Image (cartoon, rainbow, N blue to C red):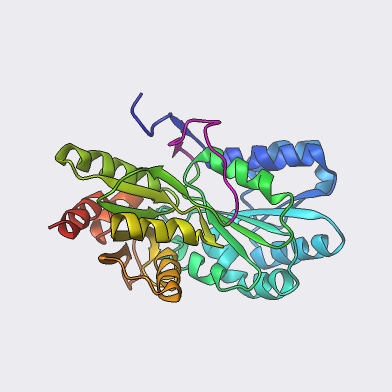
Amino acid sequence: MAKYDYGYESSRVAAGTAVFELGQKSDKIWGVTSDIGGSLKKFRESWPDRFVDTGIAEQTATGIAAGLAIEGFKPYIIGMIPFLTMRAFEQVRTDIDYQNLPVTIIGTGGGLVSTGGATHNAMEDVSLMRTLANMTVVSVSDPNMIKLLIHKSLNLKGPLFIRQGGGKSDRVIYEPGSYDVDFGKGLVARPGKDATIIVHGALVAEALDVAEALSADKIDVRVIDMYSIKPIDKALILAAVKETGNILVVEDHLKRGGLFSAVAEVLVEEGVQPKKFKALGVPDLYAGYGPGEELREKYGYGKTAVAKTIREFLK
């Protein structure tokens, strides 16, 4: 089996399994969904009195979860990212975040992966959620990672947003059981000394593919899986600047407001200047229909553009 490739699993199923496992540990766990709770089937069948499906009503799901948290329960909301983070943003902010409630929001469809067109793409969610004062924001690159983070969330005191991609068939890039995760940390997915790609979510796998391809030309690229976007791993960023100099941030999100902006804030606050520093992501437009990989190539942040940028860094 190829390096960074341990098969495929569904991160949606992994998320549902993790919530079910927490439900076995504590009767304080609730499952809440806005019409896409298929992954919570086992939870629903086991504890129907701790499960709510509001239908296509994200604001209602958010309000119910806030109420449950106020009463001492630990709710997990599962829904589609553009509607949980935009249609229900006021409720997320006022009902959950302002009160610093322990509600976990698990969103599906991060980036341009929905094939549902502009209304179903999630290009602004990281920007929105990381502006909230108490919100922790993570983006999963591996189906096993979402299970680890959901289990870690049991002891998290405030709200949490978990971003996943398509969630139906996701590449397992880390050997199961070989790593751990925590909020405020990132992973060096691949070591390297010539340049660093800082990336999150489903694009970590693509960045690893690019780095492996470039190694044939003796270009040594570090890949940082910055799964925790807020809080962010400052030490990992600063070490990458010091040790590789060249920093490329790649994300399936608008180039403004997301991971690139978070990394830039760290560099400015610390007074650190990389040799080269660039972002690749969704440009300022409403992306249309098409498969995610096709749209990433079309809008200039697919594998071709990533490899080209790294080569230009090193000229």
Let me know if residue 179 is in the magenta part: yes
- Is 154 placed left or right of 312 in the picture? right
Camera-side residue: 143 or 182? 182
Q: Quadrant of the N terminus?
A: top left
- Is 265 placed left or right of 287 in the picture? right
Let me know if residue 293 is in the magenta part: no
Camera-side residue: 3 or 31? 3
- Is 14 placed left or right of 2 in the picture? right
Residue at the image position 50 percent from the left and 66 percent from the top = 125
Residue at the extreme left? 315
- Judge whether residue 117 can be spotted in this image: no
Residue at the image position 20 percent from the left and 45 percent from the top = 219
Q: Report the predominant secondary structure element of the magenta stretch.
A: loop
- Where are the magenta residues, as a range? 168-183
Q: Quadrant of the C terminus?
A: bottom left
Query: Would you place residue 182 above or below residue 137 in this image?
Result: above
Q: Position of residue 273 (x, y in %)?
A: 32, 70
Residue at the extreme right? 71
Q: Position of residue 142 (x, y in %)?
A: 49, 41
Query: Would you place residue 148 above or below residue 54 in this image?
Result: above
Residue at the image position 63 percent from the left and 66 percent from the top = 135
Q: How many marks?
A: 0
Q: Quadrant of residue 282?
A: bottom left
Residue at the extreme front? 242
Q: Position of residue 50 (x, y in %)?
A: 82, 48
Query: Would you place residue 120 above or below residue 51 in this image?
Result: below
Residue at the image position 77 percent from the left and 37 percent from the top = 45
Camera-side residue: 19 or 183? 183
Camera-side residue: 168 or 150? 150
Query: Would you place residue 310 above or below residue 178 in this image?
Result: below
Q: Position of residue 19 (x, y in %)?
A: 70, 43
